[in-house]
Image (cartoon, rainbow, N blue to C red):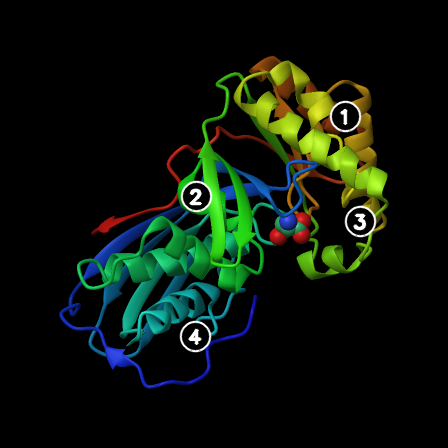
Amino acid sequence: MAGALPEQELAEAPGIAGRSILVKVPATSANLGPGFDTLGLALAQYDELEVSVIDAGLEIEVHGVGAGEVPLDDSHLVVRAAAHSFARAGYALPPIRLVARNTIPHGRGLGSSGAAIVAGVMIAKGLLEGIVEFDADRLLELATELEGHPDNVAPALFGGLTIAWTTPEGPRHKKLIVHRGVSPLVLVPEHEMSTALARSLQPEQVPHEDAVFNVSRSALLVAALIQSPELLLAATEDKLHQNYRAQAMPETDALIRALRAAGHPAVVSGAGPSILVLASDPAERAEAAALVAERAETAWQALPLAVDFKGATVHAA
Ligand code: HSE
């Protein structure tokens, strides 16, 4: 996560005493093979949060994933992201009670940190409703400032398939609706992978022909996901990141090779170690899950997940 804002005088947000909101944020899978730091897909598995403005202090309760592990003070990632978003609007985060019910696995390449950051940004949007206007570009900008790259936070915010890019004015996105034949399967191992470690394994420069290879596959992947799922195997080839990172997740690499050899469009989900299979129908999902159950040396959980089309939501409790 990028650095915090410098200390500044922050005002108390007017008229938000007693406000109470519900926030829901989907899991995401980034990269999708060739679309490194650019493409992302929202998946129908959610972290849900209930947030109320209280008289004083900070109360945090975490249920489900992360309970007993994540900090329960102002270093909690959701709280940091909410405080950052309030501060960027010129306000101090008010005293809040936050109850999180998490289902997105941590450290597995399913966008849990992006979801926590998006939750924080949505808390600011919800609690400052009618006081500060957060449009789509602003939401993406705030979330990307904290996450460092926009490919997880864009689908977590907006749902569907997103193409995200950066401009001198900030990050931007285009949301696309995925072909209804596409049936994602996520395979989640028991071990975790650090995104920072995965990123450190990549070279500063890549051969021009590899760059061209990925440009062609990324363009094809957008067409395959919205119109032509039969092209998904060719469209999910990649030379920019997965091979460089394979040494840090050998079982993921071996299973992806086996899945692809059997004709399934399998890729590393985000920075790994989970695997995303972009199957074309539920039968293919079942075949891919069976192949992994047979070949894997450790326990892998198979999650058939629908594409989430809504993205993050916030409304009054
Ligand atoms: N595009 C990012 C990466 C996603 O692969 O490093 C994980 O944050």
Q: Which residue is mark 4?
A: 73
Q: Are marks 4 and 1 in contact (CB under 8 Å)?
A: no
Q: Amino acid at mark 3?
A: Arg
Does 272 appear above or below 9?
Answer: above
Disc with the residue nearer the chain's start (3 vs 4): 4
Quadrant that contains the N terminus: bottom right
Residue at horizontal 61%, vertical 13%? 283
Q: Nearer the viewer, mark 3 or mark 4?
A: 3
Q: Nearer the viewer, mark 3 or mark 1?
A: 3
Q: Which residue is mark 2?
A: 46
- Residue 103 is labelled as none
Disc with the residue nearer the chain's start (3 vs 1): 3
Q: Residue 239: percent from the left, percent from the top?
A: 80, 39
Outermost residue toward the left? 15
Q: Which residue is mark 3?
A: 245
Q: Foreground: 137 or 83?
A: 137
Residue at horizontal 31%, vertical 69%? 89
Crowd class of label 3 (few under 14; some 14 to 19; many from 20; radius 10 Å): many
Q: Are marks 4 and 2 in contact (CB under 8 Å)?
A: no
Q: CA distance from mark 3 to mark 4?
A: 34 Å
Q: Nearer the viewer, mark 4 or mark 1?
A: 1
Disc with the residue nearer the chain's start (2 vs 1): 2
Q: CA distance from mark 4 to mark 1?
A: 42 Å
Q: CA distance from mark 2 to mark 1?
A: 27 Å
Q: Are marks 2 and 1 in contact (CB under 8 Å)?
A: no
Q: Which residue is mark 1?
A: 259
Does 295 appear above or below 56?
Answer: above
